[in-house]
Image (cartoon, grey):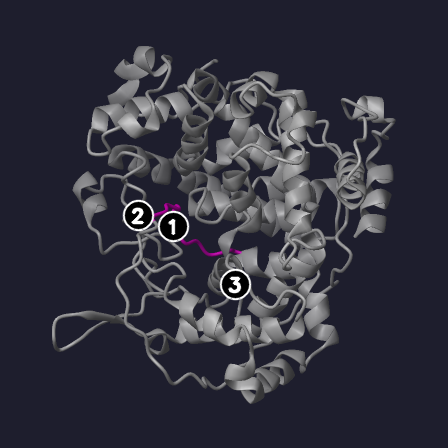
Amino acid sequence: MVIDQRNFLEAIENLSASSKKQPPPIDSIEITDEQTMCELYNSSVHFLTHDTTQFGDEYLPYPPFFSSGYSSSISSFTNSSSSSVTSETSSSRSFFTASDRFNSPLLKPKKHRVAKHDSVYHDQDNESMASLLDSNKRDYYGFKRPTQWVNVETLYRFDRDYRKILNHQSCKWNQLLTEYGGELPPFSSKLKRYARKGVPRHLRGKAWMHYSGAKAKMDAHPNEYKILLEKATEMGKSNPHAEVIYRDLHRTFPDNTYFSCAVPQPDGTVAMIPESNPRLCALQRVLLAFSVHSPNIGYCQSLNFLAGFFLLSVEDEEEAFWILETTVNDIYPENMFDDSMDGSAIDQTVLMQLVYEKMPAVWNKLSNKRCFWECVQDLPPVTLVTNHWFLTLFLNILPIETVARVWDCVFVEGYKVLFRVALAIIKLSEESICAAEDPTDALQLLQNIPKRLLDCHEFMQYVFSKSGISNDLTYRDIESRRSMFRNRRLQRIPVKPTFSSPSSAGLSDTWSDDDIVEQIYL
């Protein structure tokens, strides 16, 4: 594997020789050992080559709904919660994003929900590295920095370099908006390229709402959210999901500044009181409204994290509800979150088949050298990890800025992006997985390596490289595989595969044909 040392720390260049060695097992890593962390970081994170093509996908399917314009719609609803809960502090979740806010010369950013907080770093390039150890400072979204996964100097250097990308990103999008009279542009190959390079933070929520179709839905049902809240209030505890939703509130991003609800008590204990945090109250309302709106799903874990991050990204809780509803019911496949979770099982089968075809050495390690068709009814344990990737759209998996960059592409290009990101992560872990002693070690690797994918810009270039592991993956291919495994689940009879690669399936390689196919399937 070629190790790219561009933009790396001069301080750890002398480790380049050791970085090409096989990384040690995750369990043997001492988190506090900075040199070991540098070696692992170089081995498993900075993997990109100089000749990686930036944007090389082939198709751009249009989501089923999208709006031609955008206007703010802010609603506030009364908090009806009245109880409290005391609990031990949940396990910490730490992430990193670059923190530099910037103003667009074309569009003044609207007031953001997380606008009033300190940035992770000062704007001066000569900022002391010691300030990064201040546990009170958070990233743009209010999360802790992942100093347990990436050394402090690397965090500082990445943030410094990423500011230039953010500024360039903002300028390019401002030019794009100017071309369309200040409106978000229609779907096109140019939009796809821009989304893959990242949507500016002050436009991100607006773009997600627009391109996902959530804004069009909200405009078509202006009073729906308020009506759903009234129904949820009337149902009270008779709503079978109300208790579970409330119980999960304090477990949603517990270490995030904007979701913390730890309240010190006179006796020295700490009580988790969701009512003390307005954003948690908004999260409760969004989830209750969704449970009433989609009773076939109601509520399941992971929806709280999706809704929570939407609350940090869009204008208000009504928008958070509509983008959650659109994501779950339009972007995800059917039966992904219902009691059967058949959609989830089918997609994991598709993912494992792709690993089997594209990375046979990895498959042999994950499956203990069994043929894929022997495992269709009993998938490898690694799907416990990869299924979580899909259910959360990589929240709590990748660093938070990398998550946001993935979502930029999901809301423009669609669900196929999740397969491409998952395959990229597995490909990057290939050498480590193949060197693992048993499949359980590989499972641990796939849990931890994604947390070190700090350089979101280079990672997204790798995901969409023309020479990438999934560049030939199309929606037609994914749906063909889904259909086959869906029929297998219904019939429970052996079915021989009709193709071993997208090309042998007789699939079209034209952008317009795949676009039509996606419209039909959605």
Q: What amino acid type should be assigned to the residue bearing mark 3? A: Ala
> First in sequence: mark 2 or mark 1?
1
Asked if residue 184 can be seen in this view, the reply is: no
| Mark in the foreground, 2 or 1 | 1
Q: Quadrant of residue 363?
A: top right
Q: How much space separates mark 2 and mark 3, taking CA atoms?
A: 31 Å
Q: Is residue 130 above or below residue 222?
A: above
Question: In the rendered structure, which segment of residues is drawn in magenta?
Answer: 94-106
Kindly identify which residue carries mark 2: 123
Contact between labelled residues 1 and 3, with CB atoms less than 8 Å apart: no
Instruction: Identify the residue at image location x=41%, y=25%.
Output: 44
Residue 307 shows which numbered tag?
Answer: 3
Q: Amino acid at mark 2?
A: Asp
Q: Main secondary structure of the magenta part?
A: loop
Residue closest to the far left? 267
Image spot of residue 2 (x, y percent): 47, 13
Residue 162, given in percent of the width and then of the height, sits at 42, 39
Question: Is residue 101 found inside the magenta-colored segment of the image?
Answer: yes
Quadrant for residue 323, please give it. bottom right
Q: Local crowd at mark 1 within 10 Å, few (<14), some, or many (≥20)?
A: many
Q: Which mark is first along the chain, 1 or 3?
A: 1
Give the side of residue 207 with respect to residue 517, left or right. left
